[in-house]
Amino acid sequence: MIDSKMVFIDTSPFIYYLQHNDLYYSDMKLFWERYADCNYVTSSVTITEYLTYPYCHNDLRMIDAFYAFIDGMDIKIRSIDRKIAEKAAKIRAEYRFFKTMDALQLATACITGCDLFLTNDKQLRQFGEIRCITVEEL
C-alpha cells in the first residue's frame, strides 16, 4: 500500500473512523496517520450513504463532524457525471452481482485515477481494474 498515491475511500471506512467503531477505529486511525501524504477521493454516493443516519436522527453534530473531516483531510468529492455513470454500467454488466452504488464508487475510483480502493466489502476485491482492500486487511 505504500506505493499508493490516489486512494478512493468507500463509505464504511468513514463510518468506522468518525463513529469510533469498536472493531475498526484503531485500524482507520493508523491508516490516516500512516498514509497522510496520499491524495484521497470519494464520491457524492458517500455523502448520501454516510449522512442518511445523522439526518434520520437529526444529529447535526455528526453532519458537521463529517464535513469538517472531509475538509480537514482535503478529500476530493467527485460528483457522478455521465462518464462515471457509463463506467458504472459497464462494471455492472461485467459484475452483475455488484450493487449500483458500489459500481458507482468503483467507477469514480477508476475515472479519477485512483490506484487503491479502501472498503470493507469483501466482494469488491474481485474487481480487476483497481486494487481493492478491506479495512480488515490494513
Image (spheres, rainbow, N blue to C red):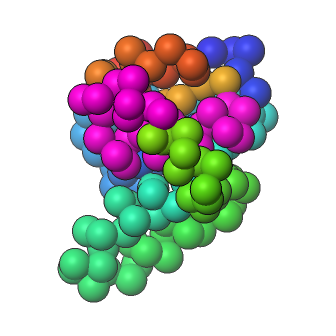
Question: Can I make out residue 36 in this image?
Answer: no
Position in image of residue 86 (x %, y %): 54, 45
Point out the stretch of residues depicted in magenta: 90-114
Q: Of residues 68 and 43, which is closer to you in this image?
A: 43
Q: Nearer the viewer, residue 115 or 72?
A: 115
Q: Residue at x 57, y 21 (%)?
A: 130
**Residue displayed at 45% across by 56% down:** 46
Please state the horizontal and vertical placement of residue 84, each as a whole percent of the image: 59, 48
Occupied quadrant, residue 25 = top left
Residue under the image location 63 percent in, 15 percent down: 1
In reply to whether residue 102 is colored magenta, the answer given is: yes
Q: Between 82 and 42, which is closer to the camera in this rendering?
A: 82
Q: Is residue 19 above or below residue 119?
A: below
> In the rendered image, is residue 39 in sight?
yes
Q: Is residue 35 magenta?
A: no
* Count of marks placed on residues: 0
- Which residue shows up at 61% across the image and 59% down it? 81
Along the line of sight, the residue nearer the viewer: 4 or 37: 4
